Image (cartoon, rainbow, N blue to C red):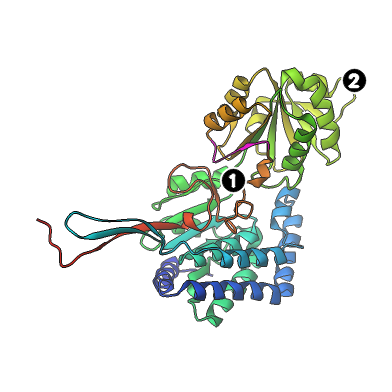
Amino acid sequence: MSLDLNALGRAARAAARQLARFSTDQKNAALNAIADALLAQHDDIMRANAEDLAAARASGMNPALLDRLSLEGRLKSIAADVRNVAALPDPVGEVLESRTLPNGMHLERRRVPIGVLGVIYEARPNVTVDVAALALKTGNAVLLRGGKETLNSNRALVSAIQGALAACQLPAEAVQFIDSTDRQYVAELLRLDRYVDMIIPRGGASLHDFCRQNSTIPVITGGIGICHLYVDASADQTASIEVIYNAKTQRPSVCNALDTLLVNSQIAEAFLPRMAERLRQGGVTFRADPRAFRILNADGTATDVLLAIESDWDTEWLSLILGVRVVDSLDEALDHIAAHSTAHSDGILTEDAANAERFVREVDSAAVYVNASTRFTDGGQFGLGAEVAVSTQKLHGRGPMGLRELTTYKWIGRGQYHVRA
């Protein structure tokens, strides 16, 4: 089947113009209707997701990606997230600043939608709903291109979303799905600058690199997380172990899960065995530097501890594997993070306020934590309702991109037939 992306783009641009006419109440009603539709069509959506899961298992997809693909037990929470977005304040129309010039003309800077978003993602069908909800709330249209693994799930989800929009008399074309697995359409989308205002890729490094190198549209990248926790000599060790356990095991297949643990050498002998005992309860295995390996495999019988190789420090595990390194100081921890972090989520466990403040100042990541799990880097956890992506860039948006990050602004001048002298 051949697709005309120019036609999709034109329809999306027209839908974005129409969305500007709708009030916050009308947009919220549509979002609640989408949540209702997801629940009403639960069985159809789950059947489609089961087809995707069966095909993925047959192809040998790894457990981490299978977990991302599955909607089992998650559709109610996805619908609840849509209602949460409806309940949030609408940023569109917010006046960011205003003033009256000496000549009497009034100026204001007002928040407005970006326009049309192009979102490219892989084995995460929940992204279809999250992105659609955030885009609609902010008056943006969106072109969605999911991975081949999610084709059936996305068809079912988009059908539910478009049906709800039409029932609420909003343009169904505001949420469109590129219904093909042909990679040529990714390249075409990246050059659809006549209609699309921003590209947001959600996937691995190869996808991000491809988008940056081939897009004629601004690209927001992120979502690749090599996340660190540093256990300072002053840390509460018992409490720290539970934070580490949560960061690693609560959902290991996502970008804000812990990848590398750095432990101060002053406490390593006492701390590492206790830490390993707890994490083994969650099925975690370890890649350890020589000092950590000596401690974790003191009797030479540990089969779940391997010596780390250099590339391990640059690996986003997305599984129950944890890199462990012993460092002699905060300086050494900061140097390691600077060398290996992807600027996603990094944290320190400490009772030393000066060390905590220095860590916050010097770690250049989108989210930096003191005595907290990296798993909090999430639009829902941050009170944003959901997220379209986690940006690790510094321009436009950084960290979880919620409603405000899907807006830009315009200047509005109100005069009395003013002319410039």
Left or right: 192 in relation to 242: left
* Quadrant location of the N terminus in the rendered image: bottom right
User: Which mark is first along the chain, 1 or 2?
Assistant: 1
Taking 103 as reference, is 30 above or below it?
Answer: below
Mark 1 residue type: Gly
Residue at image mark 2: 299
User: Can residue 184 be spotted in the picture?
Assistant: no
**Residue at position x 81%, y 31% from top?**
275
- Mark 1 nearby-residue class (10 Å; few <14, some 14–19, many ≥20): some
Residue at image mark 1: 204
* Quadrant location of the C terminus in the rendered image: bottom left
Snapshot quadrant of residue 304: top right
- Mark 2 nearby-residue class (10 Å; few <14, some 14–19, many ≥20): few
Q: Which residues are magenta?
A: 365-371
Q: Please tell me which residue lies in front, 137 or 205.
A: 137
Snapshot quadrant of residue 5: bottom left
**Residue at position x 25%, y 60% from top?**
106
